[in-house]
Image: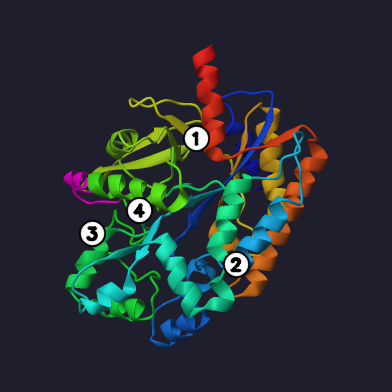
Amino acid sequence: MQAKQTVFNYLKNIRGYNTSRKLLVLSVDDYGNIRIASPSALIKLKQSGLKMDSRFDNFDTLETREDVDGLFDVLTSVKDCKGNSAVFTPFAVPCNIDYDKIKKSDFQKYSYELLTDTFIRLSAEQPNAYEGTWSLITQGIKEGIYKPQFHGREHLNLKIFNEKLQKKDPQLIIALNNNSYPELGYSGYSTISQMAAFNFWKFQENDSFIDIISDGLNAFEMVFGYKSTHFNSPGGKESHVIHKMLANNGIKYIDTQLFRKEHLGDGNFKTYYNYTGKRNREDQLFIVRNVVFEPTYGNSIDWVNYAFKQIEAAFRLRKPAIISSHRVNFCGHLDISNRNKGLNDLKLLLKKVVSKWPDIEFISADALGDIIRDEIKNN
């Protein structure tokens, strides 16, 4: 098993952008999204009979002040060859479910709120956890250690949400009454995940994403203060047709998988092979993550060493190391030991790579895209 993993670490780096520089990117999904509102909400959801089996439902919450503060301490604990701290690229949503508006509509109509309003609301409801969080985040952005990019308008599939809302789905009502949105079981469609914003059944459903993308990117700029140029689809498996919609709204880089199984409609799929630096018809560059780091996922893997070996393979084959992770690894609102484990392992990994490669450079995911695009222009 170990030998197979070693071989794969090298095989996945055969094609793509080459560089003699030791570039390291931290691409981390799910920021800005409310999953479970609070420790008390988690208890009530479990008592209601909802199946809360996944680690996301048991540990994932909107990032708290202590989550962000602890993360920034880790990022600034190391310096690269240019004296820069490690950089986090959180793929973030700028909007969340507006629970109060939906309840006031008697669960008739979907509404969303801006992330800034989410933090204001939670700072009032849970001041010990959320007061001062947003100002800390904006400070991290100014200091260049935190560079959010677009992860969709919100982290949910609106088609599934509205269909469940129309039916007054009991599980959905329980979730909304607890200001949370955990997994609610089968969506009703084999190709649509409840959390995947751009999943669909009929191909023409992609047309409904035009306004969501435009609105979402406008909201992103309003919330974070700059335009996003990099996109990662929440839940993945989006159709390539939305890449044109994204390009029309300023997205230059698409985060994608090495082997991407794309839905063509009605349950039919086609698999595409991708690599970092590959261009699509819209002249967007694909960025493929080549290192997996999920330190709170199970106890059978030494995640620091597991990720380090993948970074080593990438650098040996003259590739940037693009680490893939999720916010759930660094959340402590529901269980502080979860955050402690994730941040401790992240710190160990960063210390290890700086020690091994003193010439390492920490950059954001969009900065990597800019480097590749500039080199293409100059060659």
On screen, residue 342 versus residue 94, left or right, reads right
Residue at x-position 31% and y-position 67%: 186
Identify the element where label 2 is drawn. Answer: helix
Q: Is residue 346 visible?
A: no
Q: CA distance from mark 3 to mark 1?
A: 28 Å
Q: Amino acid at mark 4?
A: Arg
Residue at x-position 25% and y-position 62%: 160
The one nearer the camera, 292 or 105, is: 105
Q: Earlier in the sequence, mark 1 or mark 2?
A: 2
Q: Which residue is mark 2?
A: 65
Please, which colouring scheme is shown? rainbow
Q: Amino acid at mark 1?
A: Ile
Identify the element where label 1 is drawn. Answer: strand
The number of discs equals 4
Q: Earlier in the sequence, mark 3 or mark 1?
A: 3
Which stretch appears magenta? 199-208
Q: Amino acid at mark 2?
A: Arg
Q: CA distance from mark 3 to mark 4?
A: 14 Å
Label 3 crowd bin: few (<14), some (14–19), many (20+), radius 10 Å:
some
On screen, residue 112 versus residue 136, left or right, reads left
Q: Amino acid at mark 3?
A: Lys
Q: Residue furthest bottom?
A: 47
